[in-house]
Amino acid sequence: MSVNVTVLGAGVAGLAVAHELSGRGASVRLVDPAGAPGPAACSWWAGGMLAPFCEGATAEEPVVRLGQEAAGWWRAAGVEVTAAGTLVVVLGRDSAEIARFARRTSGHDRLDRAGIAALEPDLADRFGHALHFPGEAHIAPRAALATLVDALRCRGVRICDAPDTPLEGTVIDCRGLAARDSLAGLRGVRGEMAILRMPDLALRRTVRLLHPRFPLYIVPRGDGVYMLGATQIETAGRGPATLRSVVELLNAAYALHPAFAEAEVLEIGADARPAFADNLPRIVRKDGRIHVNGLFRHGFLLAPALARMTAELVLEGKIPELCT
């Protein structure tokens, strides 16, 4: 007999849960007043880095372990995954930062200038040593969300945007910060980003520039387009990016490579991501609902594992490790 499920929220968490459950035979309804993912969803502004080993520099062990499921899950879902690894570099004056990063992480190779040139020729003259994490990858988040929406549509699952839709069957709440009305301790962590076009620069993989005050990551989107991100501010504010943050973000990009001074600025965006106090996600059973929330800045990295665990809970009664 099919299990009936209603998933609330069509961000990366809700879409991943709906995809996993429907793929296992559940009858799924997906409800989001905003409809399909767009600029109003924090998933829209994500970097799409599938970088569990790099996240180990600051994140808890489950992030590293569970995040290693992500690349295979997204690939199986039909999403294009660029498995070129992550390159971590540092400016000469901050050389101690890369040694500290290496101590806190695993899964990396140390590169000299020649090694950097072999991976990213445009950065060879900028940096003398780096770390390469070959087991990491990245995806284009907006394309990934669209792929999940299309796959769900093919399975007969559509996004209902009627606010008064009756909730049937098992209700799985993936509303992100909107669930603060039910989840105590859920807070917002603001992130800001920019999308630039610089066709004269050819980077193949995610590059992280370590900086003690303003670390930067840059993710290639193809055709000379790059996504830049860096900020992490403890606030649930979801307004436009501030001038100060944008200036610091673009200055960091210029420090990575001066060619970015001539880049076209295509988009600047900001949003707040849901997080609990320890920055680990939770599957919370409360008031007749199953809440999947608190993915922090690890939405695309951890949504696959959370979706798998949620499906196992609903269909098999298996209690997930991150369940409360």
Image (spheres, helix red, strand yellow):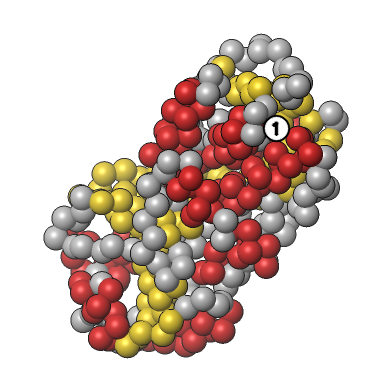
Picture coordinates of residue 183 (x, y %)?
77, 39
Would you call the spot at circle 1 few (<14 residues within 10 Å), some (14-19), or many (20 or more)?
Answer: many
Residue 111 position in % (x across, y down): 36, 84
Q: Which residue is depicted at the point 59% across and 47% down?
A: 304
Q: Nearer the viewer, residue 245 or 19?
A: 19
Relative depth, front residue between 88 and 321: 321
Observer-nearest residue: 161 or 93?
161
User: What residue would you read off at disc 1?
Assistant: 173
Please state if 287 lies on the left or on the right of 268 as rendered: right
- Left or right of 162: which side holds 114? left
- Quarter residue 61 falls in: bottom right
At numbered mark 1, what does the secondary structure look like: helix, strand or loop? strand
What residue appears at the point 31 percent right and 56 percent down from the top-left corner? 220
Q: Is residue 294 left or right of residue 136?
A: right
Whole-percent x and y of residue 240? Answer: 43, 41
Q: Position of residue 150 (x, y in %)?
A: 44, 28
Residue in front for this viewpoint, 250 or 26: 26
| Residue 44 in view (yes/no) | no
Would residue 319 be seen by someone viewing this image from the given angle? yes
What residue lies at 41% left-to-right and 85% top-to-bottom? 110
Image quadrant in which you'd find residue 13: top right
